Image: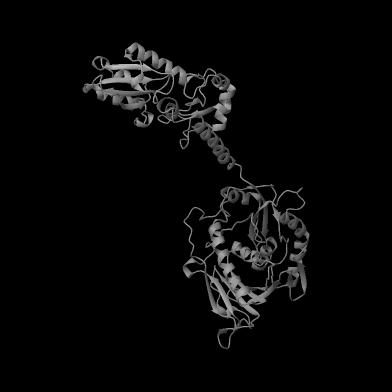
Amino acid sequence: MADMLPSPLNGEDFARVIGRLEGESTEILVVVNGFTACVYQRRTPADAWLPVCRGELSEHIESVISATLRRRMWWAQVDGSAAAADPASLDIERLTMKTLRKWLRSADDVTGREGEVTQSTRERVAYLAAWRCQFAGCGTDLHTHAPTGRSGRFSYYAHLVASSPRGPRGHAARSARLANEVENIMLLCDACHRLVDRIDPDYYTEELLQGMRRRSIADVKRLLNTLQYPPVEVIAIVGSIAGQVPQFSIHDAEPALWESHLRAANHQPEYLFHIDHQLHDVHASDYWSAVFRALKSDGSQLQRILNGAGRGGAPRPRIAIFPQHSTSVLLVAGRVLGDTGGTYLFQPHRSVAADPKGTRWVWPQRERAHRCDKFLLRVHKTAEPGAREANLMVSLTFGIAPRRLPPGCFDAASNTLGLPTVEVYVEPQDRGIHLIGAPEDLQELGRTLDRAIQILHDEWHVSRVNLFIGAPATAVVTMGQKMQARNQATYVCHESKEYDGVFLPTVEISSTQVLEPKSGQVFELQP
């Protein structure tokens, strides 16, 4: 019989359907159990009862039952499901307003009882629900009255197994035992509470509601845990650039970390390649002597962090990198850091350097639509079989003119490239210091660099790569991260001494070491 009935209605709609029967010359039968109702009609006593509606029988019904309508209404009460009862087999009686009102009071008592729920149980239930309705997909804020915005407690503590054996999902033995158990109670808004207890209690079984409750608690825990950002070790790679030493503190990093849903594990950042009062000249051997000394003093501790060692068996921590240094140093830093997961790069943005709010390191385009076609690749000159050396140009903040390449890499007499050459570039309208505006830009750049390295290593099989870079700091670190020990060629890093000048070699990075060629100084990459 339940399968033949219409969809369940709330109290107002239920009463509206009954009111429309005023003008029909039919008999009406209301079948109830302790908390919900089904309505049937027939034209003559010889006819079968036909379903009209089912759901919540509420106080709204009193306003639509006129004296005329009441004379055609019958009443029957059952112990089991009202929807499953056979109306033809029931003992029926004339409906009176006294009977109806008595039933309404009893139904409110059966489905709305909270006397068995102690204050401590209520607090625990509300805590697990975060004061949100636990019905699947509802999530109504039960601390705020939606129409008025008034604060308060607008919730119902709904029993999965009713606290009364006569209630929805009631049980002769379990109802009393589970009446004050947290696991048997879910927090609901008024609408959802009426739905599961009065409108369609046959559908909303204990098992179904228990599943909703479990998922709600799990979702609340998951979402609230996102408020606790994972900690990261903050590493600053900052140094003198053109005679200016950038200042950095943990307060510079925190806004960028928070915006990326991260937090500093320590209030003091670690410094890598930090050389106090050292004249910036990447073409001078003394400069690299200082860099290598700094690496040797910091490198062992950094390597322990990267390997996850020395932390009582704990896994490698997440690392946040804040880079602002020379191109060659950033390449070495990227090579040392590697390209494993859990490393977050942050790009300095010059236009907000003096921003007192500390947004200099915050990604400016994080919320903007990401382009997948920004970073391009082209081969200027293909390698002949047996070629052992090639050029890689990364032209992002500015285009690298071939004439700026040193002899051997470029033949000035013929105005042609002297070596096979691959270039990673952007269109002129995309060039500039802000072209890396979001982490997704770095990911896209990384994929393009991978393709360039694949050409150099796997297709051309060269053993030496002359590297020329015009790119933001994070892009340079990313390039360094790609120089890993797997069949790696030696990369000869180049920088120019002056604007628009010729690129000259600084250091050579192989799979095992960093070499400063003028003095022969070496920093071993393998501990």
The residue most toward the bottom is 413
In this image, 430 relative to 283: left or right?
left
The vertical placement of 220 against 472, above or below, is: above
| Image quadrant where one finds the C terminus | bottom right
Taking the spot 54% from the left edge, 21% from the top edge, the residue there is 175
In this image, 396 relative to 43: left or right?
right
The vertical placement of 356 against 435, above or below, is: above
The image shows residue 23 at horizontal and vertical percentages of: 21, 23
The image shows residue 431 at horizontal and vertical percentages of: 51, 67
The image shows residue 160 at horizontal and vertical percentages of: 51, 27
Taking the spot 46% from the left edge, 21% from the top edge, the residue there is 111
The vertical placement of 245 against 258, above or below, is: below
The image shows residue 376 at horizontal and vertical percentages of: 51, 69
Taking the spot 32% from the left edge, 18% from the top edge, the residue there is 62
> Could you say which is closer to the camera, residue 208 or residue 79?
79
> Could you say which is closer to the camera, residue 107 or residue 469?
107
Residue 192 picture quarter: top left
| Image quadrant where one finds the N terminus | top left
> Could you say which is closer to the camera, residue 376 or residue 395?
376
Residue 14 picture quarter: top left
The residue most toward the top is 98
In this image, 87 relative to 329: left or right?
left
